[in-house]
Each structure stands twice: as structure tokens, then as C-alpha cells.
Image: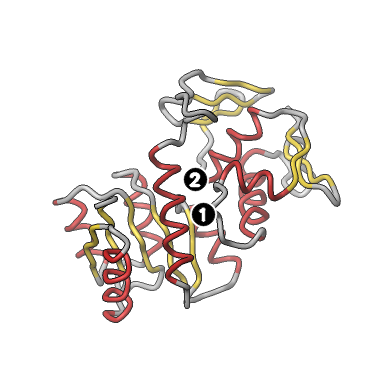
Amino acid sequence: MYASILAVDDDPLICKGLKFNLEKSGYSVTTAMTSAAALDHIHRQKYQAVILDIGLPGEDGLSLCRHVKEIYDLPVILLTARRRELDEIIGLEVGADDYITKPFNVDVLLAHLKAVLRRSAARAVLPGGQLHTENISAGPFHIEVKSHRALKNGALLSLSPREFDLLFFFIEHPNQVFETDEIIDSVWGAEFTGEPQALYVHIRSLREKVEEEPSNPVYILTIRGVGYKFTP
């Protein structure tokens, strides 16, 4: 088995489909239909990732996601039938590692899951497989690699895992202009199958946390017709 996955959705057919398709691809899968049942499973068993529907009865998926990230620090992929960008941004703010909109293609889900597990296992790995154990700084920003903390002027930033990865990437490459595809390949991985809009959403969310005036950024700059540049 590749990894142990917890799939949480209040639709029994979706749970059954997730279990069948993920196990067919080599994963060990447990399903749950409520937040309470999901937490009970997490208390009793070690999982490598959680696939979590936003629209759960009782405690919704966003609240459960926040709880899982704060207490267990597990990678979480959110499932949502609501396509509004607001839902995606809220999902990022509670620490979700990725999101997929329903209905979804199984191959797309598998690609996202593979990418999330890879990032979780090697979040601080440099190209070539060398572990990145050195803290890095640029301007007012400081990254503590082992503790996975990001600070600005000594104050801890509350970043989602993807926001942390983005800021880490930018700090490693100050004053360099990168195209959208280059950033996605470096932060999401070459197997990313989503839309470039995912990067725009994360950039906007990251700016809300690191810029004094997010609408007039001074650190993460948009280079029209090209991509983005980080200026410390």
C-alpha cells in the first residue's frame, strides 16, 4: 500500500467510489460520513492524508479541516460542489493543502493526492534530493525550515502549507521573474493538473498576510504579461 487515506463525505456513493478507486490505485482507504466519525478514526489510526468534503452535516468540512491541521498537521484535500472562489479562499485560510471541485475526474484526484503526499513527505527537500535544513531570510522575512515557521519582522505568519511553500520559493529566488507555469511546476509539482487560477488565488491570499496594502503590493509583484517577482 502506498499510504493510508481517510476519505470523508456524507454521500455514501462518493465514499464508496473514493474507496474503490483509491484502493485500486494501491492506497489503504478508510471512509467516514461525519466529522465526529472522521475524528474518531484519526484518534485511533495514523493517516498520511485526508480527503474531505466541505458540506458535511454538523461540524462542516472547513471546521474539521482547521482542527485536523492544528492538532494532527495532516495534509488535507477539500472537495467542494460550490465553485465560488470565496469557498476556495476560505479553504486555503483553514490550512487546506489543495481543493478539487465536484464532479471530479478520478485521475485528477489521484494526481492531486500524489502531489500532496509528495509535498508532505519532502516539503523541505532541495532539487537533487538534498534535505534543506538551513533557515533562510530575505528582507523582513525569515523561514525556519525544521519547524516549518515563517516570520515577518520577527512576528509569526499564519500561513497555509501552500502559502508557506510559495513564500519559501520566493525567498529562495529574490528579484527573479518567474512565469506562472514555472512557479506551479516548482511549488505544485510537474504533475499538477489544475488551472492556473489556483496560483492566482494563493498569491492573493499570501499577499493578504504579508503585504501592508495587499492591493498595492511591494513584496510579491505582478509582472504584466510574464508572471511574478519577489522583491525583499
The residue shown at (61%, 66%) is 85
| Amino acid type, mark 2 | Ser
| Amino acid type, mark 1 | Leu
Q: Residues within 10 Å of mark 1 (few under 14, many from 20)?
A: many
According to the picture, the residue beneath numbered tag 1 turns out to be 92
- Which residue extends farthest left? 44
Viewer-proximal residue among 134 and 232: 134
Q: Position of residue 178 (x, y in %)?
A: 74, 41
SS state under label 1: helix
According to the picture, the residue beneath numbered tag 2 turns out to be 160
Q: Is residue 107 above or below residue 131?
A: below
The residue shown at (79%, 46%) is 222
Q: Is residue 156 above or below residue 196?
A: above
- Among the two numbered marks 2 and 1 on one chain, the one whose residue lies closer to the N terminus: 1
Q: Position of residue 217 (x, y in %)?
A: 76, 42
SS state under label 2: loop
Viewer-proximal residue among 139 and 107: 107
Q: Position of residue 122 (x, y in %)?
A: 43, 36
Q: How many marks?
A: 2
Q: Position of residue 69 (x, y in %)?
A: 36, 47
Q: Quadrant of residue 138?
A: top right
The residue shown at (57%, 43%) is 187
Q: Are marks 2 and 1 in contact (CB under 8 Å)?
A: yes
Quadrant for the C terminus, please: top right
Q: Is residue 225 above or below residue 147?
A: below
Which disc is residue 116 wearing? none
For the residues labelled 2 and 1, the Cα–Cα distance comes to 6 Å
Position of 220 compared to 95: left or right?
right
